[in-house]
Image: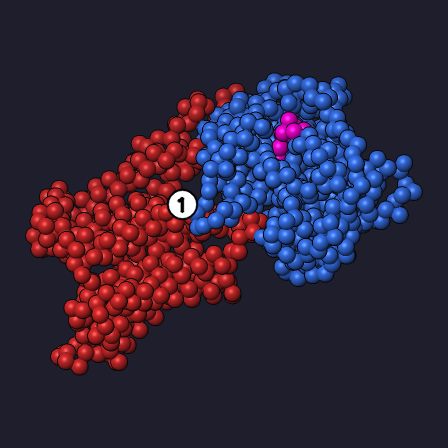
Chain colours: A red, B blue
C-alpha cells in the first residue's frame, strides 16, 4: 500500500538559540535588505539609489561644518535612546521619551528666560538640573500610577507626550510669548549667557552625551541598582523573592529614564535651538526608541546606532538640496529599516520549512541566514 | 497490511526536531482496540511530543501515522477528532461558568440541542462507560477529578474511540486514581483504544496491557505488562539498574526551628488559601507536606519566605516572629532560611542571566558602595559546577538554556551554599529525571544530617513516605493532620488529602 500524505505547504519551526554573532549578523542583514528595498523605493520615484545613498554619506563628511551638523543630530537622539534604555531594560514600556524631553526643555527654559542675569556657570548647572528634574517628573508620573493603580504605562506615557507638547504651545501663546515677535507667536531667543558653550565648534552637549553613554553603561552593568533593574525586568517574582523592593526600583528608574530624556531636551533648547519651540523634540523621543531597540539596549551600541541615524537625518537634508527630494524620504527609509529589524526578530527564533523540503536528516538543524534573506 | 487485527494507531518511524533538539527519532508504536497502552519515559523523552503529533497539534517531520490501517496526515485537532482520536491534556480546557453538559457540547458542529435531549445523551454516555457526573453541575463547583471526567466525556461525546491521556493521575489522590482506572477499564471493555502517558511505575503496572518505553526521543521497545516489574521497568526507562531506595537517616531532633501557629492566608482574589494551619519543624528533620495541587502549598511556602503577608497567625523562627516581614527584613534579622520555590526559572532564578549573576541574587547588596562585587559569585558558581557536576557551556550562559536537572542543581546549590538552618523546598524533583531526583533526595538528607530543618512540599506519595520523617496533609487550606511517616499508609494520606481528619482515618489501614 502506497502511503499518500498531504503535507502543509509551509510550516513554522522553532530553531536553536542563535549565538550573539549570529543574531548580530542577522540584524545587519536586515539593515542591508532594508537599504535594498529603500533603494527600490528611491528608484521608483525616479532617482538612482546608489547616487542618492552616496550623496547622503558624503554629504555628512564633506566638510567640518557638515560633520558638526551631523553630530548635532546625533546628540539628542543618542541621549533620548539612553533614557528609554533604562526603562526598557526593566521591561517598562516607556514611549514617553518625547514628552520627557519636552518637559526637560521647558524646565530649563524657565531659567534661561528669567534668570539670565545669573553668572554663566551656575546658570548652566541649574538649567542642567532643571532639565533633569523636569524630564524626571514626567517619567515619574506614569511609574507612580502604575505601581499604585496598575495603569498601563504604554498608553500613559504616550498621552503625556501630548500634554507636554501643548504645555509648550500654551507657554508660547501665553505667559512666555515674546512681545517683540511680529507675526506668529514665539518664545524669545535665549541670551548668549544662557546658551551652552561651544567646544570644537559644537555646543558641549556632545560631551554630555559621551559622559552619559559611559554612565549608563556602568550603571547598568556594574552597580547594584543596575542589577536590580535587570532582575525586575526579567521577572518581578524573582525580584520579590530576592528581597528587592520592586516598586521603589520602578519609580527610581523611571525618574532617571525621564531625567536623561529631559537632559536631551535641555541641550536641544539651550544648545541647538537657543529657544523653546513646539519643535524642540521633533520626534527625537520616538527615534530614540528605535535606536535603543536596534542597539539591543547596549549603551555603547546606542552611540553607534544613533550616529548612523544622524547620517540618515543629515543626509536627507543634503539630498533635499542636491536632488530636491523631500526629507520625508529619510523617514520612509527609517520606517523600512525598522520594519525589517522587527521582522528579523521572528527569524532569530523561527524558520520556515516548505513542504517537500526535508530537514537535514535530523542532524542539528543549523540556523540558516540565507533563509531569512529570502523573506 | 494484511494482518487480521487492525491497529487503531500505528506509527512508523516518526521523527520530530525542534531547533537542534531531536524530540522524536524514528519512533514506532502500535495501539490496538480494546487495550490500554502505557507510554513510559522520563521527562524530556518525547512522550508528549509524540502524542501531540497523533492528536494534530504538531506535524511529524518524517514518518507515517496509520489510523485503522490507513495512512493519514493529521493537520489539526479537528482532523484528529474526525479520525476518532481525542486527547486529554494535563491542563483542562473547560469553561468554568458553564455546566458539565454545556462544556461537553461546546464546539461540536450542528445546532445546539435542547437541554433535555443533551442531558439524555450525556447520561447515556455515562452509563455506557461507567462514568459518574452531574450534567447540570457548573465546572467551577467541581473537584479536579470531576473536571477530568467532563474532559473524558467531551471526547467520547465527539465519537472518539481512541483516547490519549497525558499524565492524568498527576493531580489525583490515590482513591481518585483508582476510580479513573476503573473508568478506563470500562472503556477498554467497550472496545476503546487508550494510551496513557505516565512516569509512575506502579500505575503502569496496575492499568496497562502493554508498555512502550521511550528514552531520549527513541522507542526502546514494547513489553507486555504482565511480564515485567518495577525494577525491570526502571531499568528499561533509565538504561541501567537503579536503586530505588531512599534512605531516612536518624538524627538529633531536639531543637524546634520553625513553628507555625494558626496561620491564615488569603489569596489576592480574596479566597482563603490557608486556614488556621499550625505545625512545627525540628532541626534534623524533614517534614513533608502532601496535598492535591493548589491546596495552599504555594501560599504556605511564600508566607514563610516573606513573600506574602498572612492575614492572621504567627510564623516563629526559634521564637522570633517573622510573619509579615519582607525577605530583606528576614535576612537582616539574621535568620538563615533558604527557599527553593516551585517556579525555578520564574522565581528562584533569573532565567536570562548566567550562573554568576544568579548567585548574586540574594547577596548582591553585600559590600559597601554602589557597585556589585561579582568575584565571589563567580567563584561560587565555579564551586557549584564542580560540586554538583552541573553541565553547562559556561557559567555565563543563561540558565534558561540548561536542562531542568541542571537548573535545579544551580538553584538548590545556591540555597544550600548559604548554610541555612531552615530549608523550604517546593516540588524540588518536579520535571527531573530519576537520577537527578535521587541526587536531590540525597542532598536533602545531607542537609538533614547537618541539623537543618527541612520543609518538603511533594506530590509523589511514595517518595514522601520514604523520605520524610513526618507528613503534614493539606486539604483546601486546612491541615487534616500531621503524622509520622512510618505509621501511616498511602491510602490514609489519600483520604486526608480529600478532607478527612487523621482521627477519622486512623482506624482504617494499618
Residue B67 is situated, as x and y percent measured from the top left of the image, at: 59, 29
Q: Quadrant of the C terminus of chain A?
A: top left
User: Where on the picture, by quarter, is residue A187?
Assistant: bottom left
- The answer to which image quadrant residue A142 occupies is bottom left
Residue B353: tell me if it is visible: no
SS at mark 1 in the image: helix
Residue stretch in magenta: B430-439
Residue B64 vertical placement versus A222 (above, below): above
**Residue B340 appearing in the image:** yes
* Residue B435 lies in the magenta-colored region: yes
Q: From this view, report whether residue B239 is shown above or below residue B333.
A: above
Which image quarter: residue B312?
bottom right
Residue A207 relative to residue B6: left or right = left
| Residue B302 is inside the magenta segment | no
Q: B49 or A136, which is in the foreground?
A: A136
Q: How many marks?
A: 1
Secondary structure that dominates the magenta span? helix
Q: Residue at x 58, y 28 (%)?
A: B387
On screen, residue A243 above or below B207? below
Q: Residue at x 37, y 42 (%)?
A: A345
Mark 1 Cα within 10 Å, few/some/many (few <14, many 20+)?
Answer: some
Which residue position is annotated with label 1?
A221
Taking depth in this image into account, of A121 and A170 the one nearest to the observer is A121
Residue at 63% from the left image edge and 59% from the top image edge? B268
**x and y percentages locating residue A330 in the rendered image:** 20, 52
Q: Position of residue A261 (x, y in %)?
A: 32, 59
Q: Is residue B17 left or right of residue A33?
A: right
Amino acid at each position: 500500500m502506497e502511503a499518500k500524505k498531504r503535507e502543509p505547504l509551509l510550516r513554522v519551526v522553532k530553531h536553536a538559540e542563535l549565538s550573539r554573532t549570529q543574531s548580530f549578523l542577522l540584524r545587519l542583514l536586515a539593515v542591508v535588505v532594508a537599504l535594498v528595498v529603500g533603494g527600490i523605493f528611491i528608484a521608483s520615484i525616479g532617482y538612482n539609489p546608489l547616487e542618492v545613498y552616496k550623496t547622503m554619506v558624503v554629504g555628512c563628511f564633506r566638510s567640518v561644518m557638515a560633520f558638526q551638523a551631523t553630530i548635532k543630530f546625533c546628540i539628542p537622539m543618542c541621549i533620548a535612546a539612553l533614557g528609554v534604555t533604562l526603562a526598557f531594560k526593566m521591561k517598562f514600556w516607556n514611549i514617553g521619551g518625547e514628552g520627557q524631553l519636552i518637559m526637560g526643555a521647558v524646565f530649563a527654559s524657565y531659567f534661561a528666560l528669567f534668570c539670565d542675569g545669573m553668572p554663566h556657570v551656575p546658570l548652566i548647572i541649574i538649567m542642567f538640573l532643571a532639565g533633569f528634574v523636569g524630564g524626571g517628573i514626567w517619567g515619574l508620573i506614569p511609574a507612580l500610577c502604575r505601581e499604585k493603580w496598575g495603569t498601563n504605562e504604554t498608553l500613559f506615557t504616550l498621552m503625556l507626550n501630548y500634554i507636554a507638547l501643548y504645555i509648550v504651545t500654551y507657554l508660547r501663546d501665553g505667559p512666555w510669548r515674546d512681545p517683540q515677535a511680529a507675526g506668529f507667536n514665539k518664545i524669545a531667543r535665549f541670551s548668549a549667557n544662557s546658551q551652552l558653550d561651544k567646544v570644537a565648534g559644537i555646543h558641549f552637549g556632545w560631551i554630555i552625551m559621551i559622559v552619559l553613554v559611559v554612565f549608563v553603561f556602568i550603571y547598568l552593568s556594574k552597580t547594584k541598582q543596575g542589577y536590580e533593574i535587570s532582575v525586575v525586568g526579567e521577572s518581578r517574582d524573582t525580584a520579590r523573592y530576592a528581597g528587592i523592593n520592586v516598586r521603589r526600583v520602578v519609580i527610581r528608574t523611571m525618574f532617571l529614564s525621564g531625567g536623561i530624556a529631559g537632559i536631551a531636551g535641555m541641550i536641544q533648547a539651550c544648545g541647538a535651538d537657543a529657544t523653546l519651540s513646539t519643535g524642540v523634540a521633533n520626534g527625537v523621543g520616538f527615534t530614540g526608541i528605535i535606536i535603543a531597540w536596534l542597539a539591543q539596549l547596549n549603551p555603547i551600541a546606542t552611540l553607534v546606532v544613533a550616529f548612523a541615524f544622524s547620517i540618515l537625518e543629515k543626509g536627507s537634508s543634503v539630498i533635499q538640496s542636491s536632488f530636491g527630494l523631500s526629507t520625508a524620504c529619510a523617514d520612509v527609509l527609517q520606517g523600512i529599516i525598522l520594519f525589517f529589524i522587527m521582522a528579523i526578530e521572528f527569524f532569530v527564533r523561527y524558520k520556515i520549512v516548505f513542504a517537500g523540503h526535508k530537514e537535514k536528516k535530523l542532524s542539528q538543524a543549523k540556523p540558516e541566514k540565507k533563509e531569512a534573506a529570502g523573506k | 497490511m494484511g494482518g487480521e487485527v487492525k491497529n487503531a494507531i500505528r506509527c512508523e518511524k516518526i521523527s520530530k526536531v525542534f531547533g537542534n533538539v531531536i524530540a522524536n527519532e524514528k519512533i514506532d508504536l502500535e495501539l490496538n482496540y480494546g487495550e490500554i497502552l502505557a507510554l513510559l519515559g522520563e521527562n524530556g523523552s518525547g512522550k508528549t511530543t509524540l502524542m501531540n503529533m497523533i492528536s494534530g497539534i504538531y506535524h511529524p517531520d518524517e514518518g507515517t501515522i496509520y489510523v485503522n490501517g490507513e495512512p493519514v496526515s493529521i493537520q489539526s485537532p479537528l482532523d484528529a477528532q474526525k479520525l476518532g482520536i481525542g486527547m486529554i491534556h494535563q491542563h483542562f480546557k473547560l469553561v468554568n461558568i458553564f455546566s458539565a453538559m454545556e462544556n461537553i457540547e461546546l464546539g461540536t458542529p450542528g445546532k445546539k440541542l435542547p437541554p433535555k435531549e443533551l442531558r439524555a445523551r450525556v447520561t447515556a454516555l455515562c452509563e455506557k462507560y461507567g462514568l459518574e457526573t452531574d450534567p447540570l453541575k457548573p465546572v467551577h463547583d467541581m473537584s479536579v477529578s470531576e473536571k477530568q471526567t467532563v474532559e473524558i466525556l467531551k471526547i467520547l461525546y465527539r465519537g472518539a474511540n481512541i483516547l490519549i491521556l497525558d499524565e492524568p493521575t498527576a493531580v489525583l489522590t490515590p482513591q481518585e486514581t483508582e476510580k479513573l482506572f476503573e473508568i478506563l477499564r470500562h472503556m477498554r471493555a467497550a472496545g476503546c483504544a487508550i494510551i496513557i502517558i505516565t512516569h509512575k511505575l506502579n500505575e503502569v503496572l496496575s492499568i496497562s496491557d502493554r508498555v512502550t518505553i521511550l528514552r531520549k526521543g527513541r522507542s526502546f521497545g514494547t513489553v507486555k505488562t504482565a511480564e515485567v516489574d518495577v525494577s525491570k521497568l526502571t531499568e528499561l526507562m533509565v538504561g541501567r539498574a537503579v536503586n530505588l531506595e531512599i534512605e531516612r537517616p536518624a538524627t538529633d531532633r531536639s531543637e524546634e526551628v520553625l513553628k507555625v501557629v494558626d496561620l491564615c492566608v488569603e489569596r489576592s482574589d480574596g479566597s482563603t488559601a490557608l486556614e488556621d494551619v499550625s505545625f512545627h519543624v525540628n532541626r534534623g528533620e524533614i517534614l513533608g507536606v502532601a496535598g492535591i495541587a493548589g491546596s495552599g502549598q504555594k501560599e504556605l511556602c511564600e508566607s514563610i519566605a516573606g513573600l506574602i503577608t498572612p492575614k492572621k497567625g504567627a510564623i516563629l523562627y526559634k521564637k522570633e516572629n517573622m510573619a509579615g516581614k519582607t525577605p530583606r527584613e528576614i535576612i537582616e534579622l539574621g535568620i538563615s532560611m533558604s527557599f527553593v520555590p516551585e517556579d525555578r526559572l520564574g522565581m528562584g532564578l533569573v532565567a536570562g542571566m548566567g550562573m554568576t549573576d544568579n548567585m548574586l541574587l540574594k547577596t548582591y547588596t553585600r559590600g559597601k558602595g554602589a557597585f556589585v562585587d561579582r568575584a565571589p559569585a563567580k567563584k561560587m558558581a565555579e564551586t557549584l559546577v564542580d560540586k554538583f557536576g552541573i553541565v553547562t557551556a559556561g557559567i555565563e550562559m543563561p540558565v534558561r538554556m540548561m536542562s531542568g536537572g541542571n537548573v535545579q542543581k544551580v538553584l538548590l546549590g545556591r540555597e544550600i551554599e548559604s548554610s541555612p538552618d531552615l530549608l523550604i523546598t517546593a516540588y524540588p524533583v518536579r520535571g527531573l529525571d530519576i537520577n537527578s531526583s535521587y541526587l536531590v533526595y540525597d542532598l536533602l538528607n545531607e542537609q538533614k544530617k547537618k541539623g537543618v530543618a527541612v520543609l518538603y512540599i511533594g506530590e509523589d506519595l511514595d517518595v514522601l513516605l520514604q523520605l520524610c520523617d513526618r507528613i503534614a496533609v493539606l486539604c483546601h487550606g486546612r491541615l487534616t493532620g500531621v503524622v509520622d511517616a512510618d505509621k501511616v499508609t498511602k491510602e490514609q494520606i489519600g483520604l486526608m488529602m480529600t478532607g478527612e481528619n487523621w482521627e477519622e482515618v486512623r482506624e482504617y489501614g494499618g
